[in-house]
Image (tube, coloured by chain):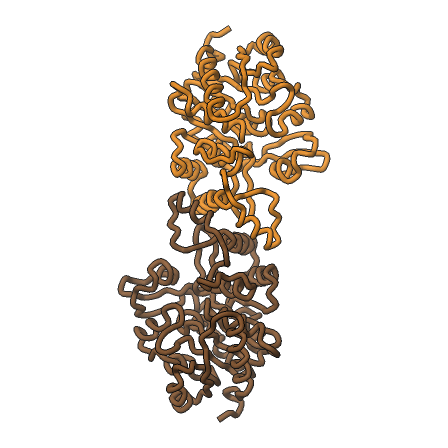
Chain colours: A brown, B orange
Amino acid sequence: MIVALAGGVGGAKLAQGLMAAPGAGDLTVVVNTADDFDLFGLRICPDIDTVLYTLGGIANPETGWGIAGDTFATLDALAGLGRDPWFRLGDRDFATHIHRTERLREGASLTTVTAELATALGIVATVLPMTDDRVATVVETPAGALPFQDYFVRRRQADDVLGVTFEGIERARPTAGVEAALAGAGLVVFCPSNPIVSIGPILALPGARDALAASPAPVVAVSPIVGGRALKGPADRMLATLGSEVSPLGVARLYAGLIDGMVLDDQDADKAAAIEAELGIATLVTGTVMGGFESRRALATRVIQFGRSLVPVGSGRT
Amino acid sequence: MIVALAGGVGGAKLAQGLMAAPGAGDLTVVVNTADDFDLFGLRICPDIDTVLYTLGGIANPETGWGIAGDTFATLDALAGLGRDPWFRLGDRDFATHIHRTERLREGASLTTVTAELATALGIVATVLPMTDDRVATVVETPAGALPFQDYFVRRRQADDVLGVTFEGIERARPTAGVEAALAGAGLVVFCPSNPIVSIGPILALPGARDALAASPAPVVAVSPIVGGRALKGPADRMLATLGSEVSPLGVARLYAGLIDGMVLDDQDADKAAAIEAELGIATLVTGTVMGGFESRRALATRVIQFGRSLVPVGSGRT
């Protein structure tokens, strides 16, 4: 079984590749929920939905998030009622949030609701929220502390990030499903998601690092930084203002002690030696920029092959 | 000031006419809320919304409810998630329910939220829910007790109605706004809405009958029964199974002691004498079947003229 840790668009793309890669076996995607927030009284889970819509084959190919061909009549009407339509929720997308919000209010766990949504979308992989507890990313900026989606969507990542905290993380726990997945994994993949605000919250959950360390599986990360830039989102700027090198080496340093292998793009081939020498992490240099389905599956296939060639940390590998 | 008591489509049509009638002055519409229910975790107020959409000029002219030209992407997507789309909520309509539900959860009263919606729709009349308390119509049928919308929409009024109860009515109260409107009214109009399940709950509110009796205004009802049939909905069948005559006389008997005048259709001219003789209620026989805006305004104008010619019960009229 492959366990992928994922955030939004980049993570979802590789997860789709992993689901379809030849010989991949069962896939479990553990998804960041620290971006979740309430809007119009509805529970919005942006990363989970991006993963669900991508794995379900209905993601908007232009944006990576939202549903292909979705319309915006409800949001437009809310704007007509004086509500700020800053977060672009489509009509079909609203159905997800309405359904989830009601199920959560009925007492269903986010894990259960996510499984229901995955089933409704015909997804063969298991999609797990990292936790059923509430965690909220807060971004420290010169303008003050901002809820994540305010920083990310409303203010378009224009603020320098001086710090990131995960409210509620100390009381949150990985779900039993997440712990079981890590314990039973044959390979763990950190998808090319933001290491600070997408993979970061998953790793910050109390017990998560121990569960990863205890897992018998090799752990491989795919760098979200290519040629000094994030393919999508603010990971490059965040790394810079938080004092990390904006490169696969900088990412690998954040993951040091957790990962056995790092996949980096051909453009960053010069970083491979430093990752191996400084951190003792094996590397695979390959094309990592994903476009459509075939390139996702191809990258996933190479990641799996690389990962399975590795001997996990703590298993005698030197 | 005119105060209109209204339920759904028929009531909304006359209310629109009253809002636009020459010399009508201020209009307050007191709307039945006993049909309200929760669906998908959202608070749905069918009669309030029909009144709002009609007065706001955006009601679907074919159905009388819902919004003209609305689309159904959200409901279709909910159906894709396994939810039963039995109650036809459009995308723009969903915005109303989402907004209202959040505002109610924030602690706003239904009166406040309704006023906000009316303002957003540019409605110059005052639209008041009959109460801010929860009241729920339950319909007794051979198939058992049914929540109103189950009977009305899901089962398409196919069940015989053996009884009607209003759950919570004994603990509910008319709002201060409703009481003030009745106390200050120059004319009260019972719109041609179902006397049992639309006007009935308003009159069943503790204190409502006393407030009407104490009002200095004449009270006029417009019959929803024309030629032995309800123009819309199950009022005719309900009257029959509950033992009332299916005619303006049967309706007038239900309102006896409350109304000073009854407006009935030309088709029912033969009932006027009995209404006057048996109940001491003045009558106006005229065309009452409303189509578009002009016919609504014309009927409203005649109703106002008739109403203002009456001396209220208890004011010395014999």
Between A241 and A192, the residue placed more toward the observer is A192
Between A226 and A295, the residue placed more toward the observer is A295
Q: Quadrant of residue B152?
A: top right
Is A132 situated above or below A286?
above
Is A282 situated above or below A154?
below
Q: Is residue A58 visible?
A: yes
Q: Residue at x 49, y 36 (%)?
A: B49
Residue B153 position within the rendered picture, expressed as x and y whole percent measured from the top left: 62, 38
From this viewpoint, which residue is outermost toward the top?
B318
Between B144 and B239, the residue placed more toward the observer is B239
Q: Is residue A211 visible?
A: no
Residue B156 position within the rendered picture, expressed as x and y whole percent measured from the top left: 65, 36
Q: Residue at x 50, y 29 (%)?
A: B12
Residue B215 position within the rendered picture, expressed as x and y whole percent measured from the top left: 44, 19
Residue A305 position within the rendered picture, expressed as x and y whole percent measured from the top left: 55, 83
From this viewpoint, which residue is outermost toward the right?
B142
Q: Residue at x 43, y 81 (%)?
A: A264
Q: Residue at x 32, y 74 (%)?
A: A242
Is B257 situated above or below A239?
above
Q: Quadrant of residue A152?
A: bottom left
Considering the image in quadrants, where does the N terminus of chain A appear? bottom right
Position of A267 compared to A115: left or right? left
From this viewpoint, which residue is outermost toward the left?
A142
